[in-house]
Amino acid sequence: MKILFFTENNHSGGLDSFLVYLINHWPDSDDQFTVVCNASHPGLTVLRSRLKRPCRIVAHAIPMHWEWMNKFASIPVLGRLAKLVSLISRYPFFLFYIVAIRRLLLTEAPDRVMIVNGGYPAGDSNRAAAIAWGMVRGARPKSVHNFHNFATPPRIWERLPEAIIDRAVAANTLAFVSVSEVCATSLENRPAAANAPVTHIHNGIPDPDPSPIDSCQVKRSLDLPGDAPLCLMLGTYEPRKGHDFLMRAFGQVLLTHPQAKLVVCGYGSDSYRQGVRQLVESLGISHSVRLFGFRDDVADLIKAADVVLVPSQAFESFGFMIVEAMSLMTPVVATRVGGIPEVLGNDEGGFLVDQNDVKAFAEQTSLLLGNAEIRKKMGAEGHHRFTQNFTARRMAGEYKLLIKQPAQSI
């Protein structure tokens, strides 16, 4: 069976990993895969290098509206009209997408189609692909529409055209599927899309490398004492990730564990990261905190850490970092935000606290730092939860059942 994944993206990241894990762990060896994406996507190199199964990557040159608007906005004087021009031009672009993608799908002639979307509505070409597939599929099933972040309601001036598009997408969609139950429920923000079934399949990751590491050496590479108790946060530098909350909580942790260190790593703007640095200095904890950009030694950092901290304050659709930590038997302290409780369960692998409870977050972190037996117990429980619920094999198997079932069975 020939399966086509259609996506639109403007940065390398989670969607690329999702496609890699899904294709590499697909249970049916005879299926053939094609990934269709905009040629400007910077993650195409990542896809090509990490895919282990044969997969055609079609990098199309269909002009993206946001690419065109970026060029328009850079024009002196005229760029001031960018918002107005964007509003006027968006839906003509959408009609163009349908025509161009229809032609592409006729050429590719897949048996099944799944659209991989960052959120909803997110990429307009993704929604156009659902409609285009409906025009050419014949007796083949409708497409599956996968989305990874919360669905957002349309703005007042967009409600009519968005309702028309959402109804057309839903009419040509076998099922909407998101990465968590809470994220799937957010599609209620788009009532016109409610005519198609909505479900969720939790994300999964590959089994980790079980090789041991020298934790002391990892810590020293971070300019830390080799025997220092280590707390770790991995996440984008942006307000919703809770850096302010975390620093205030860690300040309280240092009252009971003055030798503890906190390492924070992730993508993000220099200005926001500088703001975090200033907060650390104002709290007087700069001697215990290290701020880094993105690092590619994530697994080693998690293995070396005593506790992984996830202080998110909003819009957390799943919680990939918690799954990573559970797979490596490192306990977690996290906030009850979005899909995080679905991942961590009933304190299986760590502790959950309310998103604005700095004191509880600090107390649970201190408890784990001070008790090796609890850390070991939580780590083992988290690893069991990972193997039962969050492996890439399990995820791929569930998507296979959804994508390959006949339309009338949903």
Image (spheres, grey):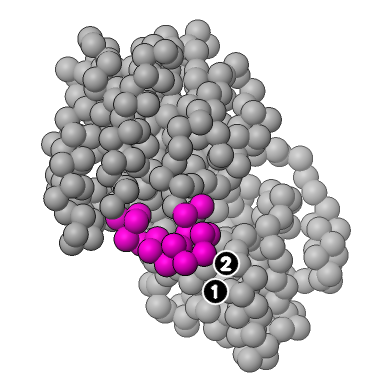
Element marked by disc 1: helix
Q: Residue 10 in the image: x percent, y percent?
A: 52, 46
Q: Amino acid at mark 1?
A: His
Q: Residue 370 in the image: x percent, y percent?
A: 64, 73
Q: Which residue is mark 1?
A: 243
In magenta segment, residue 163: no
89 sits to left or right of 63: left
As drawn, the label of residue 232 is none
Query: Would residue 247 be visible to someone looking at this image?
Result: yes
| Mark found first going from the N terminus, 1 or 2 | 2
Q: Which residue is mark 2?
A: 237
Q: Residue 266 in the image: x percent, y percent?
A: 63, 61
Point 27% across, 16% down: residue: 136
In this rendering, the answer to whether 298 lies above or below 47 is below
Closer mark to the observer between disc 1 and disc 2: 2
In this rendering, the answer to whether 92 lies above or below 98 is below
Q: Residue 308 in the image: x percent, y percent?
A: 59, 62
Of residues 18 and 75, the one nearer the viewer is: 75
In magenta segment, residue 74: yes
* Tally of marks: 2
160 sits to left or right of 394: left
For the C terminus, the quadrant is top left
Point 57% across, 61% down: residue: 235
In terms of image quadrants, where is residue 166? top left
Secondary structure that dominates the magenta span: helix
For the N terminus, the quadrant is top left
Within-10-Å neighbours for mark 2: few <14, some 14–19, many 20+: many
Contact? badges 1 and 2 (CB < 8 Å) = yes
In this rendering, the answer to whether 188 lies above or below 107 is below
**Real-space Cα separation, disc 1 to disc 2, in angstroms:** 8 Å
- The stretch of residues the image draws in magenta is 71-87
